Image (cartoon, rainbow, N blue to C red):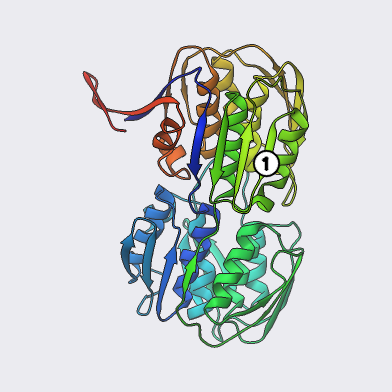
Amino acid sequence: MEKIVVNGGNPLRGEVEVSGFKNAALPIIYACALVKDKCILENIPAISDITYSFEILRGIGAKIKMLDKTTYEVDCTYIKPCISDYELVRKIRGSYYLLGAEFGRFGHAKVGLPGGCNFGVRPIDQHIKGFEALGGNAVTEGGYVEITSEDGAKGSNIYFDVSSVGATLNIMIAASVADGDTVIENAAREPHIVDCANFLNSCGARITGAGSDVIKIKGVKNLHGCTYAIIPDMIEAGSFMVAAAATRGSILITNVIPKHLESVSAKLEEMGVKVEEYDDSVRVSAENITLKRTNVKTLPYPGFPTDMHPQMTALLCTVDGTSYINESIYENRFRYVEELKRMGAKIKVDGRIVVIEGGTRLSAAPVMATDLRAGIAIVIAALTAKGKTEISEIDKIERGYDDITTKLRNLGADIKKIVLPDPNGLQIAN
């Protein structure tokens, strides 16, 4: 078992570089399965979701070579569909993008139902609706989703009942090599959808409108390889921004796209945090500033991201007054609240609203990461708390944060990861 141990109280100061965006890298990695050629992917984060994804592709015949720490060559020339490892697939949410890639390339896909963080119902009904519109016959049985079509994917008009990021990506991937034209209406607009479209277009696809609510795709017969760099991780960047504010520190966050951070920047500035934007970096400072309470409502992009909700709660615990967070995306993203309460936070949940009575310094306690974003919120809380906090279930954090302990330690945090090989000893990992 591994834990993160934090001695709180140190303001974060210095410079930190953000890694590639997990939510962009995953669909692009699986989209490589459309390409009968080699793709070179740059700015890939070193996180467990990526490791699992590469293993899933290797399992269906892909050849994957690490060229340097963040660059991989992915050769899917000779892959075979419908043989992915069920246990690997169920470890992560993003594995469902293999459905779109296999169906688009082969007209037949069979992939285990995805896993990932548990924070409420996360159906794939809009994915199924899209695949059926493309001519597929979808069956969910025995823990698998199977999509079949005798004639392969056919272009179609699709209107999503809800704006789904995953469904938008999955159908865009499949439709890029479908026979005919596809129009996706009520498409999600997140930056990683634009990034995936840009990757596919670099491989010869003909996609327009990504980033708007209407995406148009002219299907092509074949895609070719390319070299492509993944965009920076806006959620990792936002997490460091919030951590700087929560510890009343000052840090320069590099390798970012400031436009992607506008909703987080605006909310922090509303609280009194100083945010300075540069071409590919932001400086966040809360030194000697009395921060003000605020209210937050999560919304689809370009609104405030649901993936930044738990981190903001941790920050608002440090601010005098009553603040509210309205979670409009997921109905059960509140399991982290009980962990913060263990540290002395005064929080309650009323329906989809978190009520935070801030201003009381948190105290160290044994806590755990209940999911990826909740986990980093607990780390942020521990950075502000009095005493030594031990955080368990840290594999959930490592699903999406590349070497987080080293990055925080380089900013002045007293933080380390320990390995507990047996009940009688402990070993420092990093």
Q: Residue at x 75, y 28 (%)?
A: 271
Instruction: Name the quadrant of the N terminus.
Output: top left
Q: Is residue 404 left or right of residue 244?
A: left
Instruction: Name the quadrant of the C terminus.
Output: top left
Up-down: is 279 above or below 184?
A: above
Label 1 CA crowd tier, 10 Å (few <14, some 14–19, many 20+): some
Instruction: Out of 173 and 294, give the one closest to the viewer.
Output: 294
Q: Is residue 170 left or right of residue 115?
A: right
Callout 1, which amino acid? Glu
Question: Picture coordinates of residue 54 (x, y %)?
Answer: 37, 60
The answer to which quarter of the image holds residue 327 is top right
Q: Helix, strand or loop at disc 1?
A: strand
Q: Is residue 416 left or right of residue 370?
A: left
Q: Residue at x 47, y 57 (%)?
A: 142
Q: Residue at x 38, y 54 (%)?
A: 52
Up-down: is 184 above or below 189?
A: below
Question: Picture coordinates of residue 315 (x, y %)?
Answer: 64, 26
The answer to whether one can see residue 236 in this image is: no
Instruction: Out of 309 and 171, give the one closest to the viewer.
Output: 309
Give the residue pinned by disc 1.
276
Question: Picture coordinates of residue 55 (x, y %)?
Answer: 34, 59
Question: Picture coordinates of residue 408 (x, y %)?
Answer: 45, 33
Up-down: is 335 above or below 150?
A: above
Please count the marks in the image: 1
The answer to which quarter of the image holds residue 340 is top right
The answer to whether one can see residue 428 in this image is: yes
